Amino acid sequence: MFYLFVEEVRVEPFAEKHLVIILREAYSTVDLPMAFLSQGTINIISLVTILYFQEKPLLLIEEPEKHTYPYLISKMMDMLKEISKRKQIIITTYESETVKYANLENIFFISRNQEGFSVISNMAEKPEVKIFLQSDEIGIEDLYLDNLLGI
């Protein structure tokens, strides 16, 4: 599973018209309400919820990796790729680790031109990017970190 140490997640009624999400980790016997979880854990639970339980054919997700342990970013991207076979997913990110695990043809870079208008470029269509990536020494995340994608 994506989040290896989550043993159980459940939703319980709280007060009159509210619900609370309860989580138990594999390393603990204590049930934790969502308010006591880390922001990264909350984000991952939210992401899994919308990916697997949202019926809409298009999902827009802003910075899904926010507050996530770097190792889990690759797992998150694998999960996003799998779900993207069934629905369209658009994510925004500033994180090079997320860019690293995305397929080149799925990376679109948004920048401003000299007139201040937004320009959307597909990185797979840029000859300059392809030249850089011919070497195994440089990855798309390196070009992103060095601000070379607006070439």
Image: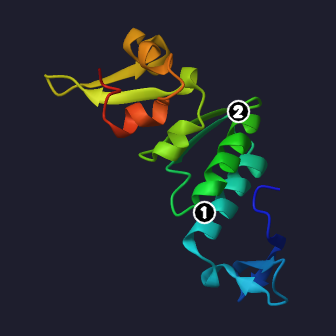
Q: Position of residue 151 (x, y in %)?
A: 29, 20
Question: As drawn, which residue projects farthest toward the left?
Answer: 115
Residue drawn where x is 50% and y is 30% of the image: 139
Work out whether residue 44 or residue 97 is closer to the camera in this orientation and state it: 97
Dot 2: element:
loop
Q: Is residue 65 left or right of residue 88?
A: left
Q: Position of residue 149 (x, y in %)?
A: 35, 26
Task: Give the quarter of the figure containing the N terminus.
Answer: bottom right
Work out whether residue 110 or residue 51 is closer to the camera in this orientation and state it: 110
Residue type for callout 1: Asn
Work out whether residue 93 or residue 95 is closer to the camera in this orientation and state it: 95
Residue 112: mark in rendering: none
Residue drawn where x is 40% and y is 28% of the image: 109
Q: Residues within 10 Å of mark 2 (few under 14, many from 20)?
A: some
Residue drawn where x is 79% and y is 87% of the image: 31
Q: How many marks?
A: 2
Q: Position of residue 97 (x, y in %)?
A: 52, 45
Residue type for callout 2: Ser
Residue 43: mark in rendering: 1
Relative to 102, residue 92 above or below: below
Q: Residues within 10 Å of mark 1 (few under 14, many from 20)?
A: some
Circle nearer the N terminus (1, 2)? 1
Mark 1 and 2 residues: CB-CB less than 8 Å, in contact? no
Residue 84: mark in rendering: 2
Q: How far is mark 1 from mark 2, CA to CA?
A: 19 Å
Dot 1: element:
helix
